[in-house]
């Protein structure tokens, strides 16, 4: 998982290469080293941080809670979903779904190095607080931190291929692709106390 920074203050921690190896074996083909930051959203949440982590693992709610947006484009046999357990509480899950947009169509195009179907979709978790999701056109890392027993902060970080930086992006496309910085997303997450977008390169996601 290149271009990510992991920190461990335990001098006795096992080598990082051993820790990340199972996760990288599942999702390394997305080549994050070939991607660039699109946007980072910070959610201040009125709930325990474990609720956030577990919610991001649950694929079954998406077709209902998000059924009027990207959840309407999930495909495959929902009764036959199979999760792969990874060491130390991690997991990976591959299924079929359209890009995470309201109309199910990518506004940026498929990652040029992927040799997988356009319906590629996956979820992953690296304990204790890193959730991952991937589509054919983008990847997202969700970092969740406890603030107190009843408060948490979660940051979805979206990355796109570097080539997207030279692709003109319509304002409509950017707004549709936005992570929970839109009013629609705020209604989807009523337990969110505050939501703010910290970064979005102007040439990739122009301001509305």
Image: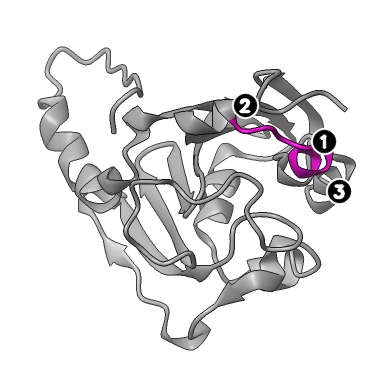
Mark 3, Cα crowd under 10 Å, few <14 / some 14-19 / many 20+, is: few
- Rendered image: mark on residue 184: 3
Examine the structure image and report whether residue 202 is included in the region drawn in magenta.
no
- Rendered image: mark on residue 87: none
- First in residue order: circle 2 vs circle 3: 2
Q: Nearer the viewer, residue 163 or 87?
A: 163
Between disc 3 and disc 1, the foreground one is 1
Write the start and end of the magenta stretch as one range. Answer: 167-175
Residue 16 % position (x, y): 16, 27
- First in residue order: circle 1 vs circle 2: 2
Q: Assign a secondary structure to mark 1.
A: helix
Examine the structure image and report whether residue 172 is included in the region drawn in magenta.
yes
Label 3 to label 1: alpha-carbon separation: 16 Å
Residue 18 % position (x, y): 11, 35
Q: Assign a secondary structure to mark 3.
A: helix
What residue is shown at x 27% (from left), y 12% (from top)? Answer: 9
Q: Which residue is mark 1?
A: 171
What residue is shown at x 76% (from left), y 59% (from top)? Answer: 102
Q: How is the image coloured?
A: one colour
- First in residue order: circle 3 vs circle 1: 1
What residue is shown at x 80% (from left), y 53% (from top)? Answer: 188
Asked whether the residues under the numbered discs 1 and 2 touch, taking CB atoms below 8 Å apart as contact, a structural biologist would say: no
Quadrant (top left/top right/bottom left/bottom right) for the N terminus: top left
Q: With respect to residue 198, does 58 lie above or below?
A: below
Residue 193 % position (x, y): 82, 32
Mark 2, Cα crowd under 10 Å, few <14 / some 14-19 / many 20+, is: many
Q: With respect to residue 49, does 95 lie above or below?
A: below
Between disc 1 and disc 2, the foreground one is 1
Q: Assign a secondary structure to mark 2.
A: strand
Q: Quadrant of residue 93?
A: bottom left
Q: Nearer the viewer, residue 66 or 204?
A: 204
């Amino acid at each position: 998982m290149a271009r990510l920074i992991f920190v461990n203050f335990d001098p006795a921690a096992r080598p990082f290469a051993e820790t990340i190896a199972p996760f990288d074996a599942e999702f390394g083909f997305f080549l994050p080293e070939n991607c660039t930051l699109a946007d980072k959203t910070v959610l201040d949440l009125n709930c325990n941080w474990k609720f956030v982590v577990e919610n991001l693992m649950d694929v079954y709610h998406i077709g209902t809670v998000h059924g009027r947006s990207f959840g309407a484009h999930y495909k495959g046999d929902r009764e036959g979903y199979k999760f792969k357990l990874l060491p130390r509480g991690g997991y990976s899950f591959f299924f079929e779904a359209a890009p995470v947009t309201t109309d199910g169509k990518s506004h940026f195009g498929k990652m040029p190095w992927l040799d997988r179907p356009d319906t590629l979709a996956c979820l992953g978790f690296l304990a204790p607080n890193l959730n991952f999701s991937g589509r054919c056109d983008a990847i997202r890392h969700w970092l969740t931190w406890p603030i107190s027993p009843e408060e948490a902060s979660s940051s979805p970080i979206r990355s796109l291929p570097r080539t997207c930086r030279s692709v003109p992006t319509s304002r409509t496309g950017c707004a549709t692709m936005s992570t929970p910085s839109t009013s629609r997303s705020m209604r989807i997450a009523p337990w969110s106390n505050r939501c703010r977008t910290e970064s979005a390169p102007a040439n990739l996601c122009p301001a509305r």
